Amino acid sequence: MNRGPLYQHDFRPQFSGHQTFPLRYGWLKKAYDRVSETKQNSKNKTLCWGDDAIARFGVGKNMVASIRHWSSVVGVIKESSRDNRVETTEFGDFLFGEQGLDPYLEHPTSLWLIHWNLATSWRKKTTWFWAFNHYPNLTFERDQLIARLENLTKELRWPQVAYSTLKKDVACFIRTYAVQPSTAKAKHDDSLESPLTELGLLKPINKRDGFSFVRGPKSTLSGKMVVYALIEFWREYSSSTALSVESIAYEPGSPGRVFLLDENDVIDRLTNIDEVTDSRLTWNETAGLKQVVQNPDFGLSSGQAFQLIKSDYL
């Protein structure tokens, strides 16, 4: 039986917003800085994304829309649906604020945070969430992924989505994570690659338009980042005071799924969770059941999760 938010009866997918452009270096900071410098204006949405944004950002109209989309979906900014206002977020401040820890995304933990936010954003990034949390195989061809998504829309009776829309969304997904082969070296510009290609989660394989998810240990993924993700997963999906290692490794939206970790990788990261969290979360093996147990005094707040990973930057 399929589980997870995509299978809720009232779910509505989203396959657009990026204007076919993957996330690029510098975009999130540009958006954060513009929102930050206009936040004193109670109706700053037009100031951020109006006609002068083309000149201010030095890009075309569609790319301005893409910058807006990515900064919102990643969670650097948030827009009110009730008024003409845009604000920075706790996450945006964490990376890009006056005391921001990584304004130029030079630390791998920042990239893992961005990936986590995208791959768990089931309300806005359907392809991203489905590919990392539900797609059953390690390898795929581009057309195969599009066809599987098309079948899913029919199976779940989602509003009809044009094939061309799915094709563009899958193309953007691939360009977000996989370094694109260059047929002409002189035309290849690394600055156009998405920063998330550095994570090595998706790679081209030796077949026509084929790709492979890279499952297994991740050398740049810190133990504290995994604990951060576990706390966010716990907050979103469970009210229990304990989570089994199977849930943490295999459930949709879990650290194991999103980071493409095997169960043994997950266990390796969690056995010292007592030390990482000052015993606010503990590793427990009773009667053969491996699980993480929550201290009753630990509230699983996002603020506490951010505090855990701050030391990664020091």
Image: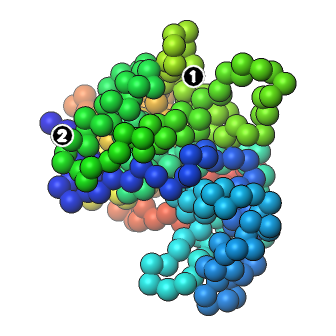
| Residue 153 position within the rendered picture, expressed as x and y whole percent measured from the top left | 26, 43
* Marking on residue 203: 1
* Residue at the spot 42% in from the left edge and 21% down from the top edge: 140
Which one is in front, 178 or 313?
178
Quadrant of the snapshot with the N terminus: top left
| Along the viewing direction, whichever of 134 and 91 lies nearer the viewer | 134
Please state which amino acid type lies under the numbered disc 1. Lys
Is disc 2 placed on a helix, strand or loop? helix
- The chosen color scheme is rainbow
Residue drawn at the location 55% of the way across and 52% of the way down: 18
Q: Is residue 69 visible?
A: yes
Q: Is residue 266 left or right of residue 45?
A: left
Residue 198: x and y in percent read 67, 33
How dense is the environment of label 1, judged by Cα within 10 Å: few (below 14), some, or many (20 and up)? some
The residue at the far left in this view is 1
Q: Is residue 224 above or below residue 137?
A: below
- In percent of the image, x 55 and y 84: which residue is there? 84
* Label 2: how many Cα within 10 Å (few below 14, some 14–19, many 20+): few
* Near-viewer residue (121 or 126): 126
Q: Is residue 41 left or right of residue 73?
A: right
Q: Can residue 292 be seen at all in this image of the molecule? A: no
Instruction: Identify whether 1 is placed above or below 4.
Output: above
Residue 155 tag number: 2
Mark 2: which amino acid?
Answer: Glu
User: For residue 100, which quarter of the picture?
Assistant: bottom right
Label 1 sits on a secondary structure element that is: strand
Residue 70 place in picture, x, y as percent: 58, 56
Give the percent coordinates (x, y) of residue 269: 50, 34
Q: Quadrant of residue 43?
A: bottom right
| Mark earlier in primary sequence (1, 2) | 2
